[in-house]
Image (cartoon, helix red, strand yellow):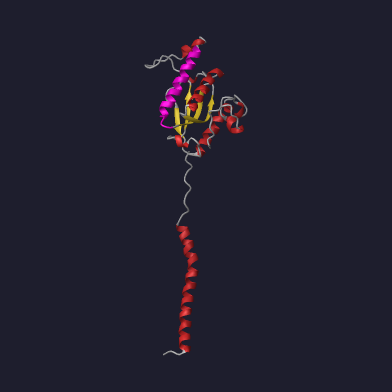
Amino acid sequence: MLNRGGVGAIVGIIGGIVAGFVAGIVGVLPLFVGVLHQQTPAPKTPPLLFTISLFVMDHARHHPEFITVTCLNWKPLLIKDRFKQIIISSLHFLSAEKRVSIFAFVIMPNHMHLIWQVLGAHNPKDVQRDFLKYTAQHILKELRNDRSPVYDELLVQGSDRKRQVWERNSKCIPVWSGKFIWQKINYIHQNPVRAGLCQCPEEYEFSSAKFYYHGDRDWRFLVHCEG
């Protein structure tokens, strides 16, 4: 049998071993954590898809679109405000009928740009077709009533129409990110400035610039792109 001195010695040895083992783990642990941290990259932030907190999100199945519509042969068919108002009236209608949410626009003398998002079960191609058809018919009606020489300048050799207001195959680009939509909004608002029609974007009446710059609500169909 071991005397008290022997037992104490054994306990001391075991205690030393345990203490050394614990100290070793404690010393190595920071290095292990550091290596693990280096080997495990931080999760990447996903790209900002344009489902930004739009309050139309529950009713939208499609991404927003940046649309460019050009007058036939770049004729300045929209130079008069009453022709621009035809476009405005149609945008009001589409918004009121909850077919689209309209985020930005500009109507220039010979073309226009829009950013909209088609809502619900509506088909983007159908909505765009109906919009262009309606506005073309009303512009032609105004030109005919005015006996404008431009009316006959719009004659085409089409199998489905005698006269044409818009160039075929309007440009349509899906908007996939918040960064991209802001690029296009700025591009839209700078159009009249680049054309020499105004000094500042918000001076031009037929665009969404005043809405974004000053919160102006003249165009009640507009929805802010960030909700």
Residue at image x 48%, y 72%? 24
Magenta range: 120-143
Indicate the position of residue 74 as horizontal and vertical percent values: 49, 21
Q: In this view, does 215 lie above or below 44?
A: above
Indicate the position of residue 71 as horizontal and vertical percent values: 48, 21
Residue at image x 53%, y 18%? 83
Q: Is residue 132 above or below residue 173?
A: above
Residue at image x 60%, y 33%? 213
Indicate the position of residue 95 as horizontal and vertical percent values: 49, 27
**Residue ranking furthest to the left:** 159
Q: Can you see residue 72?
A: no
Q: In this view, does 140 lie above or below 43?
A: above
- 83 in the magenta segment: no
Q: Main secondary structure of the magenta part?
A: helix
**Quadrant in the picture for the N terminus:** bottom left
Indicate the position of residue 177 as horizontal and vertical percent values: 48, 39
